[in-house]
């Protein structure tokens, strides 16, 4: 398949909640192939389907040189312990802000054959899982920023758009 163009704010598809995937057909198989091809680039950690313009519940990741995907993911566990780190988004290019996330996250979904898939981790993987689950819900990391940081982000975005 192919690397796809990444949608950037204020594209409304990024604010649209993704629909669950029912039957896996060639369209869904092609979507997964494109998610994998598009995330497999230097500096890309995760990619949700709506970031390439498809409002379906699937995302891919690229963490520690490993690339993978999950469809119909659900966030099943988050640690109470949190950590704050600079976070960015391919759909909000060039802007990074300190963002609080749980230190550990676990996501469960399926692969294209309907087999169960569990993805979990701490650090960058945990951050990636939470970030991509937000995308599928039509949210952006900008929504998670603390007040002062968010005000700065909104100002910097206005200057840019
Ligand atoms: Zn993102």
Image: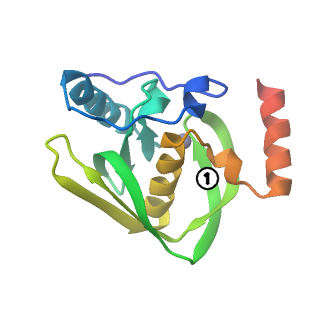
Numbered disc 1: secondary structure: strand
Rendered-image quarter of ligand 1: top right
Residue 144, how many percent across, how many down? Answer: 68, 54
Q: Residue at 49%, 31% (x, y): give it.
A: 51
Q: Is residue 68 above or below residue 104?
A: above
Quadrant where the image shows the C terminus: top right
Coloration mode: rainbow
* Residue 38 occupies quadrant: top left
Q: Is residue 144 left or right of residue 74?
A: right
- Which residue bears the numbered disc 1? 87
Q: Residue at 24%, 56% (x, y): give it.
A: 117
Residue 24, how many percent across, how many down? Answer: 20, 32
Q: Residue at 47%, 43% (x, y): give it.
A: 43
Residue 145, how many percent across, how many down? Answer: 73, 54
Quadrant where the image shows the N terminus: top left
Q: Residue furthest bottom?
A: 81
Residue 107, how many percent across, how many down? Answer: 37, 59
Q: Is residue 6 left or right of residue 41?
A: right
Q: Is mark 1 within 8 Å of ligand 1?
A: no
* Residue 81 occupies quadrant: bottom right
Q: How many marks?
A: 1
How many neighbours does mark 1 have within 10 angstroms: few (below 14), some (14-19), or many (20 or more)?
Answer: some
Q: Residue at 28%, 47% (x, y): give it.
A: 68
């Amino acid at each position: 398949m192919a690397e796809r163009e990444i949608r950037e704010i204020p594209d409304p598809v990024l604010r649209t909640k993704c629909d669950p995937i029912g039957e896996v057909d060639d369209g869904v198989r092609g979507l997964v192939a494109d998610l994998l091809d598009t995330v497999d680039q230097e500096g890309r950690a995760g990619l949700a389907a709506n970031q390439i313009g498809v409002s379906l519940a699937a995302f891919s990741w690229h963490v520690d040189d490993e690339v993978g995907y999950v469809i119909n993911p659900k966030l099943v566990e988050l640690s109470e312990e949190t950590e704050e780190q600079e976070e960015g988004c391919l759909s909000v290019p060039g802007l990074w802000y300190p963002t609080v996330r749980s230190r550990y996250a676990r996501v469960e979904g399926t692969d294209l054959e309907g087999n169960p898939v569990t993805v979990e981790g701490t650090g960058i993987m945990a951050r990636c899982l939470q970030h991509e689950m937000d995308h599928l819900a039509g949210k952006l990391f900008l929504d998670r920023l603390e007040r002062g940081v968010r005000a700065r982000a909104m100002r910097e975005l206005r200057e840019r758009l």
